[in-house]
Amino acid sequence: MSLKRNEGWREPLLAITARLGLTFLIGFVLLVLSVFPIPTGHFGDVRPGFILMAVYYWSIMWPSVMTYLTTFLIGIAFDLLAGAPPGMNAMTLLMVQAVTRSQRKFMINQSFRVIWAGLALVAFLTALIHWILFSLLHGAFLGAQTALVGAVLTCLLFPVMMPPLSHFGRWIADKSSRLV
């Protein structure tokens, strides 16, 4: 998105603002879905990582859709709404985004199964990081069952969430490119 001599600054600014706004709006909806736990009998309240799915998938398919700023803001909002230490989810989501973007060239032409396996790896590593951080925060090893079940649920829901994520990612990318 470069400015030509005759172009003004409003069109590119409008495109960037629209893309960030749409991404944040969709991210916020996924955030709300991620915040509300699913009550289970033996494992406590389990939270599937809907926002983790979006950050992972959009970092592969449309990296310009999910900016680092948007990821950070959604992560901080997630921390505040879920009662997590401020910055914990923001940090892990930014790590997921950075690592996924670094592997984008490999992942972009892979089959769904490879992308799904990548999400599984990311979901379990994120669950491990959260479990370690919460254990350090409480000064004792906490049960890992809730984190593991949340990671499994994230993996199981990814095939259901991928078509809407793909649709919205393509739509946001298309809308922002038409505004320029």
Image (cartoon, rainbow, N blue to C red):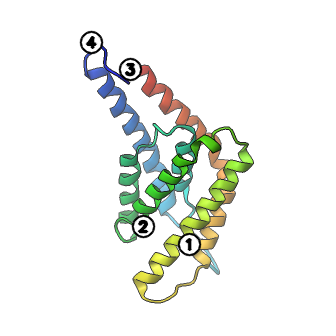
Measure the alpha-carbon separation of dots 3 and 2: 37 Å
Kindly identify which residue carries mark 3. 180
How far from the left and from the top, in percent, is residue 101?
52, 46
Q: Residue at x 48, y 52 (%)?
A: 98
Residue that mark 2 sits on? 82
Q: Nearer the viewer, residue 129 or 157?
A: 129
| Residue 166 point in image, percent of width and height | 60, 38
Read off the residue under disc 1: 128
Determine whether, in the image, residue 121 is placed left or right of residue 133. Answer: right
CB under 8 Å between callouts 2 and 1? no
User: Of label 4 and label 2, which has the lower sequence position?
Assistant: 4
Q: Amino acid at mark 3?
A: Val
Tell which tag, 3 or 2, sits nearer the viewer. 3
Circle 1: element type: helix
Instruction: Identify the mark at residue 5; answer none if there is no mark.
Output: 4
Mark 3 neighbour class, 10 Å CA radius: few under 14, some 14 to 19, many 20 or more:
some
Tag 4: residue type? Answer: Arg
Q: Eyeballing the image, is 138 above or below 85?
A: below
